[in-house]
Amino acid sequence: MAKHKIYSMSVASVYPHYIKKAEKKGRTKAEVDEIIRWLTGYSQKELEAELEKQTDFETFFKEAPQLNPSQAFIKGVICGVRVEDIDEPTMQEIRYLDKLIDELAKGKAMEKILRES
């Protein structure tokens, strides 16, 4: 089965869209970066390096320093699909990121987005 085209897209090509979506709703680039770092374990410097290298989504998540174990608490629908029901791990991680950015744009508090108790 052929891989979805998002796997080969660079994170850097989608990143400005994440920023734009957040900023349109009064949120910041710093909050987007914090979400990405929380989900993947990249430091800010590492994240910037991955964006600079034009790393594709598949590699970005495969080589992530430490995927956050709390990602299992991310629930809901994105693109008409329940993120918790996605079987393919990389696609699920991509959709987790989409869901978190969506929550940011909807005005959810960072503590809730980052699943802090």
Image: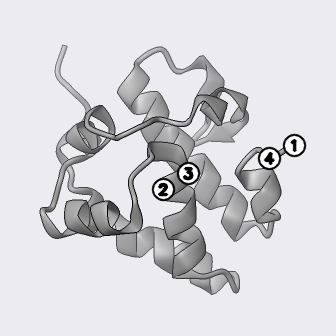
Q: Quadrant of the C terminus?
A: top right
**Circles 2 and 3: CB atoms closer than 8 Å:** yes
Q: Amino acid at mark 1?
A: Ser
> Can I make out residue 82 in this image?
no
Q: Camera-side residue: 91 or 109?
A: 109
Tell me the distance, in whole angstroms, between the alpha carbons under discs 1 and 4: 4 Å
Tell me the distance, in whole angstroms, between the alpha carbons under discs 3 and 1: 15 Å
Q: Quadrant of residue 11?
A: bottom left
Left or right: 12 as drawn, with respect to 29? left
* Label 4 vs 2, first from the N-terminus: 2
Q: Camera-side residue: 93 or 116?
A: 116
Q: Camera-side residue: 113 or 47?
A: 47
Residue at figure coordinates x 21%, y 26% from the top left: 3
Q: Camera-side residue: 95 or 5?
A: 95
Q: Amino acid at mark 3?
A: Trp
Which element is circle 3 on? helix
Query: Which residue corresponds to mark 1?
Result: 117
* Label 3 vs 1, first from the N-terminus: 3
Query: Which residue corresponds to mark 4?
Result: 116
> Can I make out residue 28 in this image?
yes
* Label 4 vs 3, first from the N-terminus: 3
Question: Which class describes the residues within 10 Å of circle 1: few (<14), some (14-19), or many (20+)?
Answer: few
- Horizontal and vertical percent for residue 72? 65, 26
**Circles 1 and 4: CB atoms closer than 8 Å:** yes
**Location of residue 72 with respect to 49 vertically, above or below:** above
Query: Which residue corresponds to mark 2?
Result: 37
Tell me the distance, in whole angstroms, between the alpha carbons under discs 2 and 1: 18 Å
Residue at figure coordinates x 27%, y 45% from the top left: 60
Q: Quadrant of the N terminus?
A: top left
Tell me the distance, in whole angstroms, between the alpha carbons under discs 4 and 2: 15 Å
**Circles 3 and 1: CB atoms closer than 8 Å:** no
